[in-house]
Image: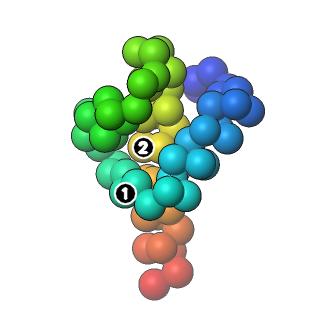
């Protein structure tokens, strides 16, 4: 299991996601998307990992409904 993500990280990821940024289920592509934001390397990687995991969960939930 990984570390628990902080509330501020989750809130920032939610804000970026609500702005219409489309994330993938690929960590490397998500890192490239987040490079435009002025984030530290650690925060960028944590957010890319969080968005990757949440996107994979969304896809699995959509498949389950079908």
Q: Which residue is mark 1?
A: 22
CA separation, marks 2 and 1? 11 Å
Q: Residues within 10 Å of mark 2 (few under 14, many from 20)?
A: many
Q: Answer left or right for 57 relative to 34.
A: right
Q: Which residue is mark 2?
A: 52
Q: Which mark is residue 34?
A: none
**Foreground pick, 5 / 9:** 9
Q: Residues within 10 Å of mark 1 (few under 14, many from 20)?
A: few
Residue 57 visible here:
no
Q: Position of residue 25 (x, y in %)?
A: 34, 49
Quadrant location of the C terminus? bottom left
Compare marks 2 and 1 and give the one earlier in the sequence.
Answer: 1
**Residue, far bottom:** 66
Disc 1 is placed on an element classified as loop
Q: Residue at x 58, y 24 (%)?
A: 2
Q: Position of residue 53 (x, y in %)?
A: 48, 44
- Residue 21 figure quarter: bottom left
- 57 relative to 27, above or below: below
**Foreground pick, 33 / 36:** 36
- Residue 35 figure quarter: top left
Q: Answer left or right for 16 relative to 37.
A: right
Q: Residue at x 63, y 21 (%)?
A: 3
**Foreground pick, 24 / 21:** 21
Disc 2 is placed on an element classified as helix
- 42 relative to 15, above or below: above
Q: Position of residue 15 (x, y in %)?
A: 59, 48
Q: How many numbered marks have been drawn onto this rendered protein structure? A: 2
Q: Residue at x 51, y 38 (%)?
A: 50
- Between disc 2 and disc 1, the foreground one is 1
Q: Answer left or right for 9 relative to 33.
A: right
Q: Position of residue 7 (x, y in %)?
A: 74, 33
Q: Answer left or right for 41 relative to 27.
A: right
């Amino acid at each position: 299991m990984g570390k628990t993500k902080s509330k501020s990280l989750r809130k920032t990821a939610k804000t970026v996601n609500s702005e219409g940024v489309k994330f993938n289920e690929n960590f490397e592509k998500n890192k490239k998307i987040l490079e435009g934001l002025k984030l530290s390397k650690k925060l960028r990687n944590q957010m890319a990992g969080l968005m990757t995991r949440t996107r994979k969960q969304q896809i699995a939930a959509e498949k389950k409904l079908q």
